[in-house]
């Protein structure tokens, strides 16, 4: 068997056409079909879902067409913790990857509340949810989550849809500045609604989101928070990363760093976390009585 493999390699080296064919076959195993349906939208497959992607975001399109490695460890762990009958909040839903994953797992008695302020991105989120069998489980809001309701300037980046933010360098050239509606989670989520899991990815607005969900945090002691921690973004919002982490610790949360390519995490102390340039986090409060993967 090994002799045959060696002979095949020698033959491919001496036959350029065969070598190119082998490369194409290898790529074919890694790539998925990408269908441009308009100048602004590309369709591809993501697990069981058909996904509308922003055509101008070349990096994102490439990541989903050539593989599914964007935040792989985060997605795997999120999927392990979301289960039947749960209510999930997706703050900063973007095109809806986590909204789709959650809606497919919470069952007919579960609910997903999904927030995305960017108009073009929200349109893709609507498309992605509407074509699934789980659309009746999802409530969509074209709003930014913050610590107060109102309207605020919002920066929309050209070509990198994941960088849109309430907090931006006003001296920087490039992003389009629009106005978006803001809401707090305590206002948007009905009083008495149990919340099990919250995913937060809001480009620096994380402290505002936490301040605006104090009722939810108090009434749901077993709540799980999945969150991007990026000190640079938090400072750009005029907040202190250290003060933010100490606020979370004061609310009883322990920090767990999510491994990049595994559905697993490792507990980390606050001081050690402060020394990191960024991290994807799972936060939970002991004694934890919720479901375990």
Image (tube, rainbow, N blue to C red):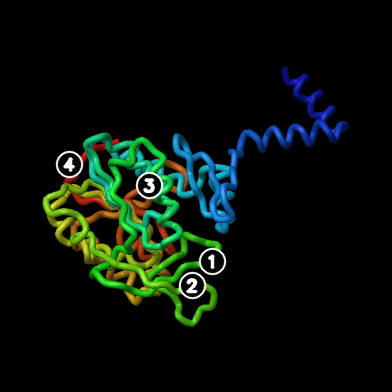
Secondary structure beneath disc 1?
A: loop
Sequence-wise, which precedes: disc 4 or disc 3?
3
Instruction: Identify the residue position indicated by label 1 in the image.
Output: 158
Q: Quadrant of the N terminus?
A: top right
Q: Nearer the viewer, mark 4 or mark 3?
A: 3
Depth check, front residue: 96 or 242: 96
Sequence-wise, which precedes: disc 3 or disc 1?
3
Residue 264 visible from this viewpoint: no
Q: Residues within 10 Å of mark 2 (few under 14, many from 20)?
A: few
Return the residue found at the far front: 38
Instruction: Identify the residue position indicated by label 2 in the image.
Output: 176
Dividing the picture into quadrants, the one containing residue 100 is top left
Sequence-wise, which precedes: disc 4 or disc 2?
2
Q: Is residue 151 above or below residue 221?
A: below
Q: Residues within 10 Å of mark 3 (few under 14, many from 20)?
A: many
Residue 109 visible from this viewpoint: yes
Question: In whole angstroms, how far apart are the C-alphas of marks 4 and 3?
Answer: 23 Å
Question: In whole angstroms, how far apart are the C-alphas of marks 3 and 1?
Answer: 23 Å
Question: In whole angstroms, how far apart are the C-alphas of marks 4 and 1?
Answer: 44 Å
Q: What residue is shown at x 35% (from left), y 46% (from top)?
A: 99
Contact check, label 1 and label 2, Cβ < 8 Å? yes
Secondary structure beneath disc 4?
A: loop
Q: Nearer the viewer, mark 3 or mark 1?
A: 1
Q: Is 161 left, or right, of 135 in this rendering?
A: right
Q: What residue is shown at x 45% (from left), y 52% (from top)?
A: 124
Question: In whole angstroms, how far apart are the C-alphas of marks 4 and 2?
Answer: 45 Å
Sequence-wise, which precedes: disc 1 or disc 2?
1
Contact check, label 4 and label 2, Cβ < 8 Å? no
Q: Position of residue 252 (x, y in %)?
A: 19, 57
- Which mark, residue 98? 3
- Which mark, residue 289? 4
């Amino acid at each position: 068997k090994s002799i045959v493999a060696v002979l095949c390699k020698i033959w491919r080296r001496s036959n350029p056409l065969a070598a190119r064919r082998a490369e194409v076959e290898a790529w074919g195993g890694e790539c998925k079909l990408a269908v441009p349906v308009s100048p602004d939208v590309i369709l591809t497959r993501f697990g069981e879902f058909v996904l509308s992607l922003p055509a101008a975001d070349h990096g994102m399109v490439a990541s989903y067409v050539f593989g599914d490695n964007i935040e792989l460890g985060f997605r795997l762990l999120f999927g392990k913790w979301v289960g039947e009958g749960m209510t999930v909040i997706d703050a900063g839903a973007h095109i809806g990857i986590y909204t789709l994953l959650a809606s497919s797992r919470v069952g007919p008695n579960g609910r997903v509340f999904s927030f995305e302020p960017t108009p073009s991105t929200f349109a893709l989120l609507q498309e992605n949810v509407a074509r699934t069998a789980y659309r009746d489980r999802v409530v969509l809001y074209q709003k930014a989550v913050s610590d107060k309701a109102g309207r605020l300037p919002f920066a929309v980046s050209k070509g990198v849809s994941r960088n849109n933010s309430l907090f931006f360098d006003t001296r920087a050239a490039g992003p389009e500045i629009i106005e978006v509606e803001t809401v707090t989670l305590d206002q948007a989520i009905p009083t008495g609604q149990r919340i099990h899991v919250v995913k937060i990815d809001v480009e620096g607005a994380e402290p505002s989101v936490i301040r605006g969900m104090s009722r939810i945090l108090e009434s749901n002691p077993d709540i799980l928070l999945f969150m991007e921690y990026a000190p640079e973004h938090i400072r750009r919002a005029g907040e202190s990363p250290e003060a933010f982490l100490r606020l979370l610790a004061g609310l009883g949360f322990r920090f767990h760093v999510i491994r990049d390519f595994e559905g697993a995490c490792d507990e980390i102390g606050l001081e050690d976390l402060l020394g990191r340039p960024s991290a994807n986090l799972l936060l939970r409060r002991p004694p934890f009585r919720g479901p375990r993967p």
